[in-house]
Amino acid sequence: MHTLSAILLAAGDGTRMKSKHPKVLCQVAGKPMIAWVLDACGAAGVGDLCVVLGAGADEVRPLLPERAAVAMQTERRGTGHAVMQCIPFLEAHRADTILLVYGDVPFLDPAMLREAHAAHLSSGAAATVLTATLPDPTGYGRIVRDAAGEFAAIVEELDADEATRAIGEINSGIYLFAADALLEVLPSLTPQNQKGEYYITDAIGLLRAAGRPVRTFRAPVETTLGANDRAGLLRLSDIAYDRIRRRHLANGVEIVSSDGVLIGPDVTIGRDTRILPGTILRGHTRIGEDCVLGPNSLIEDSEIGDGCTVNATQIYQSVLEAGVKIGPFSHVRPNSRLCAGAKIGDFVEIKNSTVGEKTAVAHLTYVGDSDVGARVNFGCGVVTVNYDGVKKYRTTIGDDVFIGCNTNLIAPVSLGDGAYTAAGSTITRDVPAGALAIERGELRLKAGWAARKLAARRKK
């Protein structure tokens, strides 16, 4: 089979989305539309890729594969004009099949693309147009067939008469071209239409006029689905989230209610995990088996081990090992690891830290830039004071340490194995293993001071 390469058209701005960002960055189910398309192309076996970008190119580039070529369309003059910017790429891939696709069709199906490519090659076509039949084809180019039912032409809606507008079969905007055939006709495209643009659809007509075979391939309706405004984007997300939930249900995940349950397309979840209302799972998140997530929890780009409980908590770019219990109302910030059996209570923040096995951080505590051992007990109100206004420093806490309530650990500082700190201490020096640290200011009493203050306040 010929190598499958692709041209991805992504130069559209966000005008109709009322956005200052490129359209392809608008998200469906928490994932940019272009990322959906790139993943589908990769899964379909696309090798080399050329992405056509316009305004906002610098925002899109970070999402592209490292080896992707970029062509710039600084002047928006139609789809044919966009493909003309890729001529150097086409020249370098003359022997390939070229998949031409838009960057805003998130439901592109890799299996369908592979099937279409096989059909394209077996038919010997110079071009294959992927079509679909819609109950309401408004806005799409129509597929016109001859008396024998064979493909005859694509007619854009602005250029169509009443009879042609009544046709339900539409051009999906996705094509497969023999690269050498596409190169032959691109120089002959002209802007002879109502919009004064270069249409890639005219390349199909030119190929037919030259006697080159053009075929069609029926694609699922979902392949054509895109969005031109925020309402359309919401519809796409609703469809995507529903599909994702159904997939996880089929794999043994329990979702007790769909209310506010938003699971991204790249999330994996183990069987017998229970998802409660208000749970949001985003990015490349992996959830183990037998977990309870929610209510009202958000987990992004993180790994959650088997048997974890995450209650009303936000977790970002971190790892929870097996059996961790956390929440409610806690926050795990990036680059944190909570080791097996750790317990994190309410109103606790963990940042860029490791919390050892079976360590308990009960409530109202901040652990930042710290390395905490196993079986440590944090009392209420403990703070690792990691920032002096200029630099950040780490705190090191050994195994089996007991940290009294309202202890401040002024980093850089370390507590040896089995050390204790007295409640209310501000620890500024290292504490040896097995020692008790008491670091408090001297108590000074001023007899009668409070009574005089209260009397003055009442008099006023």
Image (cartoon, grey):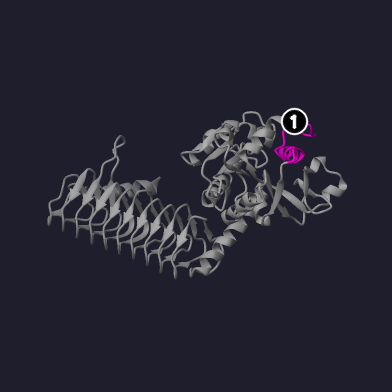
Q: Nearer the viewer, residue 275 or 167?
A: 167
Q: Residue at x 59, y 61 (%)?
A: 242
Q: Residue at x 26, y 61 (%)?
A: 357
Q: Is residue 436 magenta?
A: no
Residue 57 locus on image (x, y percent): 55, 34
Q: Compared to 63, does 123 lie above or below? A: below
Q: Is residue 239 visible?
A: yes
Q: Quadrant of residue 344?
A: bottom left
**Label 1, residues with CA under 10 Å away: few <14, some 14-19, many ≥20:** some
Magenta region: 191-211
Q: Residue most toward the right?
A: 162
Residue 297 locus on image (x, y percent): 46, 59
Q: Compared to 190, does 284 lie above or below? A: below
Looking at the rendered structure, the kind of residue marked 1 is Thr
Q: Which residue is mark 1?
A: 190
Q: Quadrant of the C terminus?
A: top left
Q: Is residue 206 magenta?
A: yes
Compared across the picture, whether 17 is left or right of 67 comes to right
